[in-house]
Amino acid sequence: MQNNKFDGSEYQDAFGGAKKIHQAIPIPPELGGRVGAALSSARPGHGMAWRKTAVSAAAVLALFIISVNASPAFAKTVYRVPVLGNVARVFTLWRYSEQSDARQIRIEAPSVSNTGHAELEARVNHEIQSKIDTILEESKKRSESERKAYLETGGKAEDFIPVTVDVNYEVKCSNESTLSFVINKTEVRASSNTEQVFYNIDLKTGKEITLPELLGKDYRKIADASITKQIAELKKDPKNMFFEGDEGFHGISSDQHFYINTKGNPVICFDKYAIAPGYMGLLEFEIAK
């Protein structure tokens, strides 16, 4: 039997007074659009559970302001989620969990607010919605397909291990000038696989921050030298292993993933298996400026 619920009774209590306001907000039709280049294995789509909670960036902000002012319980709950304080930047808009014979899904969806750039917020929040919406729909289809194939090839229903999908986010830096956060999607089947989406925003201009802006025109040379040195240090521990030859590290790419830490330094990120065996997991290298 399938069970859909928002995770945490405190969220239900917190939203109590604002629930009717939330449900009354019309969902603009343009939010049904798709973002072409989303996660590696995710393309835009729609899921019923997400449609029930999807609102435009303006509606999100309106609901947030109304709810904080109208409900002390809501305000208390909101201030326990990452990076609000005196200025709201990234907060948990909604939580969703689902458990069935085919899958277990947990989602903590972020939203960006109060950056001073309305168009930026609308674009980023729309993109986040589309990506998570896609993950939800495709995870359901894939898990149902895998369970069906398992049963059709003689597997017992009670022995099938549900596909597990976990979506959350991490705020890496939030100050007056910089907002950097990462959305993580982890899927566990026969093995575990994590995909990440990175946002590095200049709050003064409302534009994406690039590595050349952080490290200068020689950013590749600087990053490559630092990463090569750090890999050499890691190799001194016999438990750490990196690919050699053609499969090894030969420099960052033109679209290299990175986030910005609280020091203001870029942290270069590599996917599992990119430059090292899978057991090394996701690899990160801080590049000191």
Image: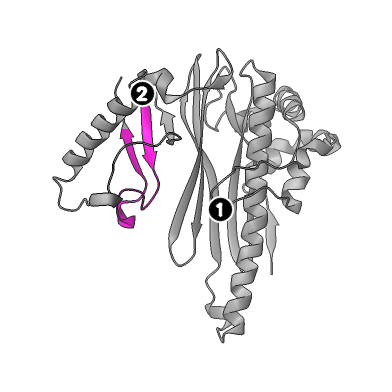
- Across and down, in percent, residue 45 comes to 71, 50
Secondary structure at numbered mark 2: loop
Return the residue found at the far front: 246
Q: Which residue is mark 1?
A: 41
Seen as rendered, the residue at the extreme bottom is 154
Residue 155 rendering spot, x and y as whole percentages? 55, 83
Q: Which label is found at residue 265? A: 2
- 235 relative position to 139: left or right: left
For the point 23% across and 36% down, the residue is 228
CA–CA distance in space, label 2 to label 1: 29 Å
Question: Left or right of 228: which side holds 171?
Answer: right
Q: Position of residue 286 (x, y in %)?
A: 31, 30
Q: Disc 1 on helix, strand or loop? A: loop
Image coordinates of residue 21 in percent, x first then y, are 82, 33
Does 106 appear above or below 91? below
Stretch of the chain drawn in magenta: 266-285
User: Which amino acid, mark 2?
Assistant: Asn
